Amino acid sequence: MKIIKQIIVLGFFSAGIIYELLSKLFKIMSVKTVQKKLSIGIVFLTIGATTIACTSTKGTNADDPTIAIAEIVEEFKIEKSGAQMWGETCNRCHLAPSPADYNDTDWETISLHMRVRANITENQITKIEEFLKSAN
Amino acid sequence: MKKLIILIIAVVFGNQMNGQTYNTFEPSKTQFMIRGYGHTGFEYMKSGDEKESTFLGSAFAPIFLFKHSDKLMFEAELEFVLENNELEVGLEYADVMYVLNKNMTIRAGKFLLPFGTFMERLHPAWINRLPTRPLGFGHDGIAPSSGIGVELRGAFDLGGPSLNYSVYSTNGPRLKDGSVEPEEAGMLMFQNFEDNNLSKAIGGRLGLLPFADSSTEIGISAYSTSGVGEEDSVYEDIGAFLYALDFAFVKQIPAISGLVDIKAQYNSSNVDTATFIETHEDGDEEAYSFDNQSDSFYGQLSYRPTMADSDFMKKLEFVGRYSDFNAPEGAEWEEKSIQYAFGINYWLTWRSVIKMSYQTTETEGGHDGDGITNTDGFFLHWAIGF
């Protein structure tokens, strides 16, 4: 359910952006018109992302054990280790860091910094941080 | 004697109490850390008949991280560069961030703009695989690198794939009207620390990692403002719309015993048409305008034989990059450039690299004149992150 919500909102935003770009590319509209429409697209994204981010689905799932179990099973299926995520995620920009190069406290600081800088999901950064702290 | 005994007792017990206090002291929630990077090197350039070579003074970019709690952090990066026989100091970014929830973080201050990925994630010397930036970035580039404002950003797990987003509002760029530098009339200047009008820029980036292994990312960015000119000037209502498309693919491929890294980004800048004044040598003034559209592109491929038997080979990296830049026809800064760069890197550690590269650029127009200029360069750089 959560994923469907996310896809709907992202679909809205993506459609807005793609429409803007196509409009610009084919030079159908003036710059100012595009600016106005882009504004609307960004407003859509902001509202959509805020709505999703601020909506907790825990209560809903807790009431329905079938959904809760299905989600746990789904998460179990795609579960990746922190070590695997460390290799995949860090390498997207730079070589994966050696866990031994910083202590636990430093890794906490670096993880928060990188979570925001590289726009990494909470799940990924939590597991990567746990791995780095366990392996240093 | 009595006073001496009391003094000794005070010192001994004082030390013990101090030691006990220290031993039971819990780690502070406030964490401060200095990270950053630096680089130095040698460059040889040949442009037409002109040749020059120089050792480069070290560039030093400390990053200050102040983690106030698990959600609140301040980050800042300074940049010290020796240029034109002077020490230049710049504030790359300085912002405060707060994690609102697992999918959203708010940032405010001067921050790197997510316009594509190169300037936000890949430009630091120890990350950039070549010693130079692609065409279209940096000085006189068309891609904005940082801005002062506020931003919301975050990422979502989509059950394997993931998606990240960013939306922001900043002071936006200011238009160079040619009154100070006539040869740059019509350019956008993104260093707009105090806004020159009431219009703000808005922008954002949407990035999709469609595969569970995070190997591929496709991004689309947009940046728009309805006013880039000075308040109450004839350029007040000149608007601008920029967009970028970016692509990344990083994956270990056993069939070729190594890691392949592909990066690409296309930037487009569209500024409303305006009229500028050109002053001739005899003092006569002439009004002119042009279709103010620029674009640039770069594609980079690198390969590290990480699964090779030899330790030496594992530390090598081979890299090639193509980039081009097209500035508007009719502008004083009209230019068409194409650049090829090739390099071999040797990774001493995961954050320290020696880069050797050759680069050739063909430029038609630009600051150097109307003809075609070929510039060849050889670079040897040493970069370190810390």
Image: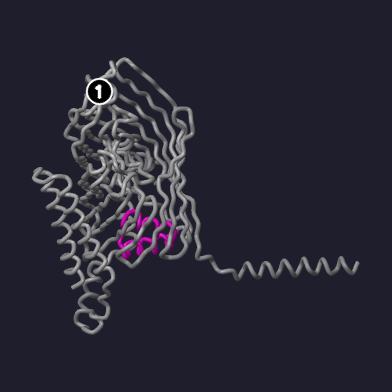
Q: Main secondary structure of the magenta part?
A: helix
Q: Position of residue B26 (x, y in %)?
A: 55, 69
The region drawn magenta spans A108-136
**Quarter of the rendering containing residue A89:** bottom left
Q: Colour scheme in the image?
A: one colour
Q: Is residue B276 above or below residue B119?
A: above
**Quarter of the rendering containing residue B125:** top left
Q: Position of residue B247 (x, y in %)?
A: 21, 47
Q: Position of residue B385 (x, y in %)?
A: 43, 45
Q: Is residue A59 above or below residue B138?
A: below
All told, the count of numbered labels is 1
Taking the view exactly as shown, the residue that stands out farthest to the front is: B232
Q: Which residue is mark 1?
A: B285
SS at circle 1: strand
Chain of the residue under the numbered disc 1 shown in the image: B
Callout 1 amino acid: Glu
Which quadrant: the N terminus of chain B?
Answer: bottom right
Q: Nearer the viewer, residue B177 or A44?
A: B177
The verdict on residue B42 being magenta is: no
Check disc 1: other Cα within 10 Å, few if <14, some if 14-19, many if 20+.
few
Q: Position of residue A124 (x, y in %)?
A: 32, 62
Determine the residue positioned at 24% across, 71% down. Answer: A75
- Asked whether, in this view, residue A129 is left or right of residue A36, the answer is right
